[in-house]
């Protein structure tokens, strides 16, 4: 029923009304040439209300058409108004008393994917705030049982966000996703929500009641940001306000997918990277699109292994030098963190590459502009590695190799592999993986930022502040989003450290033998500490920090606030040059046992690597 109240339908009816009215005027003038123009205008209007009277002589055909269709158009308007009234009344009744619901602000390709995932995986009711113009671009999207659509341009505009907040009972919602496609609009919407909650008496009453009942009433607000520099700035906001009891987080779908892929296809999952290994962990990235840039930077942040060699990232694109130049403008210290090897796209697909470098590639990510090219490049890479790979088998009963991993990252706008699923099946037959930003738009990734990672990150923050020379300055909910991210990256790097030891995380109920952490040698511990320090330096350098001397307050304590504003840190140096107390901090993030215990899981010996 919601489709019947769209602006597009009213526009169509309006056009028919004008056409019918105009031909009615023409018809009356043909019917009675002596009739004044004002009378023709009035009589043509009467056609819509069945009040026009005719004399006995012949009626022109054009007037016949007008007097036949005019009442139909008038009836359509009345019917449409009635349906609109019923639809709005029914929707408003459904909104009465609504609570623990999910609000999605804006409709575009990304929110469409989000809606699909939420409708399939969430039991909560969903309120979608959109405009009729946005809705017209997604004709396949229809209000479902758990979905209510608010057309913000019916009686109020998107700029009147306070009225919308009241209508959707925002004070009782569980989560809000602000994804209008415009960064400025998204940020302004967050400000409006905060202002609404500040003046909302119902929210304060609900807080008191729920706290008395010991219920969680935290409103989660997720705002999508496209621009990297804007994202870095917004990450400095405080993610949780205990007064409003609202959690605010800024995210980017392509960044989320990059993190997912970097964790899932880490090079050490395909070859053992041990101490003293001189060969760098190498990945291949084809396509320096916005998605490709995020995969590149995530790899530079996370791929720091036991051999203490900078990760090698082979990048390929058309005019690769200019593309990389623009990336260096955003990340000027990227070369300090990773070894970047540039290869022209044409040379790559012709196979005119340095095989000494390509033989060490463990993972390949293809992030080109369209799905057809991604598929083509993925197959060419599989062909290249297949021909070059050493094999004792001459084609009979040969199994498809699993190294290196090849991932075709198709654009957000693409539905190609949904429409032609057999193409996906053919590519997966030869171990080519297909990924799309839509696959990470789900509750597991957005609602809890991956619950396991979040809990381990919280544990690291607690342990860091629990040292004898430290006090817990801020609890987790008081941290800025950027401070939380620093701990999250440490948590995401933990599986890499565990794989170096030949162990992994498993459910507490598993029959696998539990790993005895007392068997870890001092040399292995030091290796892990250096791995952590190199990863931490990569994180700091990529966000713009450089080495600098400490600033001190009048009481002799280091002035971290000033140092953070200036983006300097005196620990950005080789591990062996660090002070003993700083080396001790690295050991916190390297220790995994207690952190994993927080998840009710355990570390077990990996049978494939033991």
Image (cartoon, grey):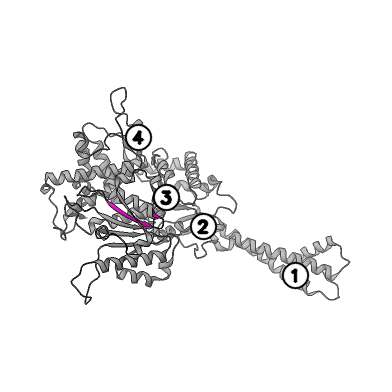
Q: What residue is at 38 percent from the left and 46 percent from the top? A: 328
From the viewer's perspective, is 601 left or right of 335?
A: left
- Distance from disc 1 to disc 3, alpha carbons, whole Å, reads 52 Å
The quarter of the picture where residue 19 lies is bottom right
Q: Was residue 315 drawn as part of the magenta stretch in this picture?
A: yes
> Mark 3 highlights which residue?
175
Q: Was residue 321 drawn as part of the magenta stretch in this picture?
A: no
Q: Residue 372 at what x, y percent from top left?
A: 41, 66
From the viewer's perspective, is 388 left or right of 227?
A: left
Mark 4 or 1, which is nearer the eye?
4
Q: For mark 1, does the 10 Å Cα neighbourhood hold few (<14), some (14 to 19), or many (20 or more) residues?
A: many
- Label disc, if present, on residue 438 of the rendered structure: none
What are the residue bounds of the magenta stretch? Answer: 307-320
Sequence-wise first label, 3 or 2: 2
Mark 2 or 1, which is nearer the eye?
1
- Distance from disc 4 to disc 2, alpha carbons, whole Å, reads 44 Å
The answer to the question of whether label 3 and label 2 lie on touching residues, with beta carbons closer than 8 A, is no
Sequence-wise first label, 4 or 2: 2
Q: Residue 465 at what x, y percent from top left?
A: 26, 36
Mark 3 or 4, which is nearer the eye?
4
> Mark 2 highlights which residue?
149
Q: Secondary structure at mark 3?
A: strand
> Mark 4 highlights which residue?
564
Sequence-wise first label, 1 or 3: 1
> Mark 1 highlights which residue?
66
Tell me the quarter of the image containing the N terminus. bottom right
- Distance from disc 2 to disc 1, alpha carbons, whole Å, reads 36 Å
């Amino acid at each position: 029923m919601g489709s019947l109240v769209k602006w597009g339908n009213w526009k169509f009816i309006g056009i028919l009304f004008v056409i019918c009215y105009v031909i009615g005027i023409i018809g009356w003038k043909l019917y009675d040439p002596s009739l004044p123009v004002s009378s023709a205008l009035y009589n043509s209007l009467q056609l819509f209300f069945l009040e026009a009277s005719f004399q006995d002589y012949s009626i022109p055909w054009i007037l016949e058409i007008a007097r036949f269709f005019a009442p139909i158009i008038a009836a359509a308007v009345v019917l449409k108004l009635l349906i609109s009234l019923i639809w709005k009344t029914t929707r408003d009744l459904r909104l009465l008393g609504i609570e623990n619901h999910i609000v999605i602000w804006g409709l575009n390709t990304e929110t469409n994917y989000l809606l699909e995932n939420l409708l399939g995986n969430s039991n909560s009711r969903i309120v979608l705030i959109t405009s009729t113009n946005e809705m017209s671009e997604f004709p396949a999207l229809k209000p479902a049982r758990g979905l209510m659509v608010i057309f913000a341009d019916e009686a109020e505009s998107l700029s009147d966000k306070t009225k919308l907040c009241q209508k959707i009972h925002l004070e009782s919602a569980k989560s809000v996703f602000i994804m209008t496609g415009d960064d400025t609009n998204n940020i302004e919407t967050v400000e409006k929500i905060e202002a609404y909650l500040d003046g909302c008496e119902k929210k304060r009453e609900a807080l008191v009641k729920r706290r008395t009942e010991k219920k969680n009433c935290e409103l989660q607000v997720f705002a999508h940001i496209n621009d990297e520099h804007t994202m870095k700035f917004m990450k400095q906001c405080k993610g949780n306000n205990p007064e409003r009891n609202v959690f605010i987080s800024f995210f980017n779908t392509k960044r989320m997918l990059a993190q997912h892929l970097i964790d899932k296809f880490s090079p050490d999952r395909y070859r053992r990277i041990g101490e003293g290994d001189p060969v760098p962990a190498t990945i291949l990235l084809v396509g320096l699109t916005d998605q490709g840039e995020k995969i590149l930077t995530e790899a530079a942040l996370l791929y720091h292994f036991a051999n203490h060699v900078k990760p090698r990232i082979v990048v390929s694109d058309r005019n690769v030098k200019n593309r990389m130049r623009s990336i260096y403008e955003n990340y000027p210290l990227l070369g300090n963190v990773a070894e970047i090897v540039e290869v022209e796209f044409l040379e790559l697909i012709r196979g005119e590459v340095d095989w000494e470098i390509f033989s060490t590639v463990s993972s390949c990510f293809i992030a080109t502009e369209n799905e057809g090219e991604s598929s083509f490049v993925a197959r060419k890479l599989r062909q290249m590695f297949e021909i070059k790979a050493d094999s004792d088998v001459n084609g009979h009963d040969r199994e498809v190799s699993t190294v290196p991993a090849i991932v075709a990252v198709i654009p957000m706008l693409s539905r190609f592999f949904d429409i032609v699923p057999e193409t996906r099946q053919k590519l997966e037959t030869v171990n080519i993986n297909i990924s799309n930003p839509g696959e990470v738009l789900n509750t597991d990734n957005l609602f809890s930022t991956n619950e396991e990672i979040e809990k381990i990150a919280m544990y690291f923050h607690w342990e860091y502040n629990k040292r004898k020379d430290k006090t817990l300055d801020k609890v987790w909910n008081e941290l800025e989003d950027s401070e939380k991210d620093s701990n999250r990256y440490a948590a995401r790097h933990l599986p890499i450290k565990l794989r170096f030891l030949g162990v992994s995380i498993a459910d507490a109920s598993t029959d696998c033998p539990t790993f005895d952490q007392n068997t870890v040698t001092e040399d292995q511990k030091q290796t892990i500490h250096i791995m952590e320090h190199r990863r931490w330096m990569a994180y700091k350098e990529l966000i713009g920090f450089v080495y600098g001397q400490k600033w001190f307050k009048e009481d002799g304590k280091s002035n971290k606030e000033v140092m953070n504003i200036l983006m300097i840190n005196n620990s950005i140096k080789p591990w062996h040059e660090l002070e003993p107390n700083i080396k001790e901090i690295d050991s916190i993030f390297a220790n995994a046992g207690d952190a994993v215990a927080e998840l009710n899981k355990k570390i077990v010996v990996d049978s494939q690597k033991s």
